[in-house]
């Protein structure tokens, strides 16, 4: 009779030479517990093994004793060769490879490969508590994700995959388990950067949508760059430059027709850059662009022709129709746009060109007078 797992012989009542059976069991236990084999690649049994030497047998072992044994079993020398059959789930150490193996249904597998294939419901690292609500928790100061040497090109990517477009994929930053900042993908494909000024009081700091629009301090941008603020104590937009030269802050508008892949030249009348102003009106909506400063192409651009003008536009009192008031012409001249009658509500120092009288007129604080 033998034990069911390790096949160790039982002592039988009134058995003679019980010490022999007991010693065989102890020797087998010595070989199986914390099992260590010298190699798993030796094909023929060694000629002068030391007592206790053990080997994991190859598929076709050679030798008087080994050839009678089952491949994948352990051959241990205990005065003579003895075959041990490790049970499923047993681990052994291969000395010449410094490798741990585990026995499964399909035979022996390297333990590190088995760990890679584990399907765990929860995992805690760095003495983090094993929380039933968290699939992965880690208590670490640093973590490194490094790309392997192959396959090329050696990219590394951390992926957060949500199940539906209405779900949220989020990276949350906390202090003492209280959320303070978050980067998340939300409904509509918007990428949001949020911050909490106090517990559970969140606001969108930065929002980017699939159309390429970016919003600052608002959740649904309506322009390529849309900024909203209630802070009047600081500039809405500020830029600084530090350079050991005369260089300053540059704001550049580049106009092209066509597409980014196949750009075309600007045509006469194209707006190169514009600054506009609008405001909320008493009807509860935003006005149109009521004031404007525009840089305009005055001719079709070629390699040798870049004629431009600058236009200033305002809206008269009591009107919603913006019109050009002053232009800097391509020839360097300043042009006041003609008016057929004197402007309303004049103030001293104002000048206009009267198209009816074909004359410049100025207001001296009491009346309009001809100039020149």
Image: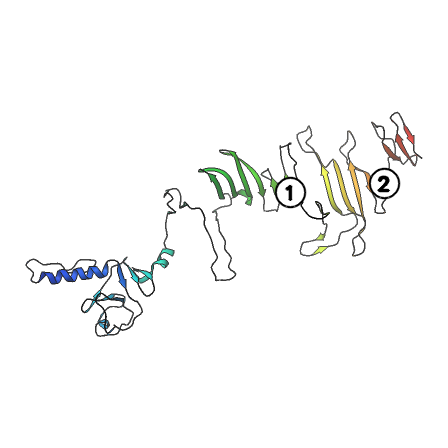
Residue bearing mark 1: 225
Q: CA distance from mark 1 to mark 2?
A: 33 Å
- Is residue 95 placed above or below 312 in the rendered structure? below
* Residue extending furthest toward the top: 366
Classify mark 1: helix, strand or loop. strand
**Whole-percent x, y for residue 126 in the image:** 39, 47
* Crowding at mark 1 (Cα within 10 Å: few <14, some 14-19, many 20+): few
Quadrant, the N terminus: bottom left
Colouring: rainbow
- On the question of residue 167 being in view, the answer is no
- Is residue 308 placed above or below 217 in the rendered structure? below
- Residue nearer the viewer, 56 or 119: 56
**Whole-percent x, y for residue 234 in the image:** 64, 34
Q: Are marks 1 and 2 in contact (CB under 8 Å)?
A: no
Taking the spot 90% from the left edge, 33% from the top edge, the residue there is 361
- Residue nearer the viewer, 258 or 157: 157
- On the question of residue 112 being in view, the answer is yes
Taking the spot 73% from the left edge, 43% from the top edge, the residue there is 274
**Whole-percent x, y for residue 54 in the image:** 25, 66
Residue bearing mark 2: 335
Q: Quadrant of residue 338?
A: top right
Total marks in image = 2
In the displayed structure, does residue 62 sit left or right of residue 163?
left
Taking the spot 69% from the left edge, 57% from the top edge, the residue there is 262
Quadrant, the C terminus: top right
């Amino acid at each position: 009779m033998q034990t069911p797992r390790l096949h160790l012989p039982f002592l039988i009542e009134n058995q003679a030479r019980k010490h022999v059976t007991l010693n065989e069991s102890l020797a087998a236990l010595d070989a199986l517990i914390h099992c260590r084999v010298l190699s798993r690649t030796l094909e023929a049994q060694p000629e002068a093994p030391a007592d206790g030497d053990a080997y994991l047998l190859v598929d076709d072992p050679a030798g008087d004793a080994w050839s009678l044994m089952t491949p994948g079993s352990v051959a241990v020398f205990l005065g003579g060769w003895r075959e041990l059959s490790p049970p499923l789930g047993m681990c052994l150490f291969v000395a010449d490879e410094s490798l741990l193996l585990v026995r499964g249904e399909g035979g022996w597998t390297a333990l590190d490969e088995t760990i890679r294939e584990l399907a765990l419901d929860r995992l805690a690292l760095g003495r983090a508590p094993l929380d039933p609500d968290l699939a992965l928790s880690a208590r670490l100061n640093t973590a490194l994700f490094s790309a392997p040497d192959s396959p090329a090109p050696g990219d590394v990517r951390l992926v957060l995959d949500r199940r539906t477009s209405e779900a949220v994929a989020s990276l949350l930053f906390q202090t003492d388990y209280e959320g303070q900042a978050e980067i998340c993908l939300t409904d509509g494909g918007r990428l949001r950067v949020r911050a909490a000024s106090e517990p559970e009081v969140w606001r969108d700091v930065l929002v980017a949508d699939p159309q390429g629009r970016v919003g600052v301090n608002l959740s649904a941008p309506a322009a390529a760059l849309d900024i909203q603020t209630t802070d009047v104590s600081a500039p809405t937009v500020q830029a600084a430059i530090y350079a050991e030269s005369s260089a300053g802050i540059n704001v550049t508008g580049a106009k092209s027709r066509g597409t980014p892949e196949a750009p075309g030249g600007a045509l006469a009348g194209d707006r190169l850059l514009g600054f506009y102003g609008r405001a909320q009106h008493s009807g509860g909506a935003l006005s149109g662009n009521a004031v404007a400063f525009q840089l305009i192409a005055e001719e079709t651009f070629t390699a040798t022709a870049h004629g431009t003008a600058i236009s200033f536009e305002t809206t008269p009192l009591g009107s919603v129709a913006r019109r050009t008031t002053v232009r800097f012409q391509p020839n360097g001249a300043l042009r006041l746009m003609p008016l057929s009658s004197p402007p309303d509500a004049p103030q001293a120092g104002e000048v206009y060109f009267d198209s009816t009288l074909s004359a410049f007129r100025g207001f001296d604080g009491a009346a309009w007078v001809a100039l020149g």
